[in-house]
Image (cartoon, grey):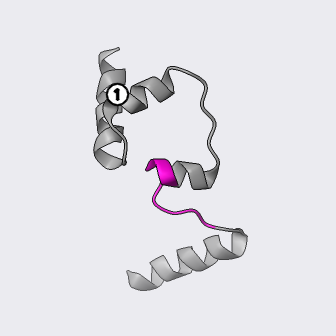
Amino acid sequence: ERVQTQLFHILARHSSQTAQTIEEDFDRDRWMTAVEAKDYGLVDDVLGDATDVIKSLEDERLRR
């Protein structure tokens, strides 16, 4: 349980949610679309299709 509490606080620090909200949401089954996960603060970006993924990887490689 201690590890779970730490996880909630880490997620809260890096998302737009409070640790309390995250704990409540994790206490029940919660499914999210990619866009909902982004709005929740769990992911930074949502890529469209494979073409977007390939372009993103190529752009990242060029920045290095």
From this viewpoint, which residue is outermost toward the bottom?
62
Residue at the limit of the structure toward the top, as seen here: 1
Q: Is residue 57 above or below residue 8?
A: below
Which residue is rendered at x = 40% and y = 83% of the image?
63
- Can the viewer see residue 17? yes
Q: Residue at x 64, y 48 (%)?
A: 33
Q: Does the magenta stretch include residue 55?
A: no
Question: At which x and y percent is residue 48?
Answer: 67, 68
Look at the magenta stretch and give its main secondary structure: loop
Pointer 1: what residue? 20
Query: Would residue 5 be found to the left or right of residue 37 on screen?
Result: left
Q: Residue at x 34, y 28 (%)?
A: 20
Give percent across and percent down for residue 46: 57, 62
Is residue 27 depicted above or below 61 in this figure? above
Horizontally, residue 40 falls left or right of residue 9, namely right
Tell me where residue 35 sits by quadrant. Answer: bottom right
Q: Report whether 28 appears left or right of 15.
A: right
- Classify mark 1: residues with Cα within 10 Å, few (<14), some (14-19) or many (20+): few
Amino acid type assigned to the residue bearing label 1 in the image: Gln
Q: Would you identify the image quadrant in which residue 31 lies?
A: top right
Report the magenta residues as a range.
Answer: 39-47
Asked whether 42 falls inside the magenta stretch, the response is: yes
In the rendered image, the quadrant that contains the N terminus is top left
Residue 13 image position (x, y, % from top left): 28, 44
In terms of image quadrants, where is residue 29? Answer: top right
Q: How many marks?
A: 1
Q: Can residue 42 be seen in this view?
A: no
- Residue shown at 43% from the left, 50% from the top: 41
Q: Is mark 1 on a helix, strand or loop?
A: helix
Quadrant location of the C terminus in the rendered image: bottom left
Residue closer to the observer: 40 or 9: 40
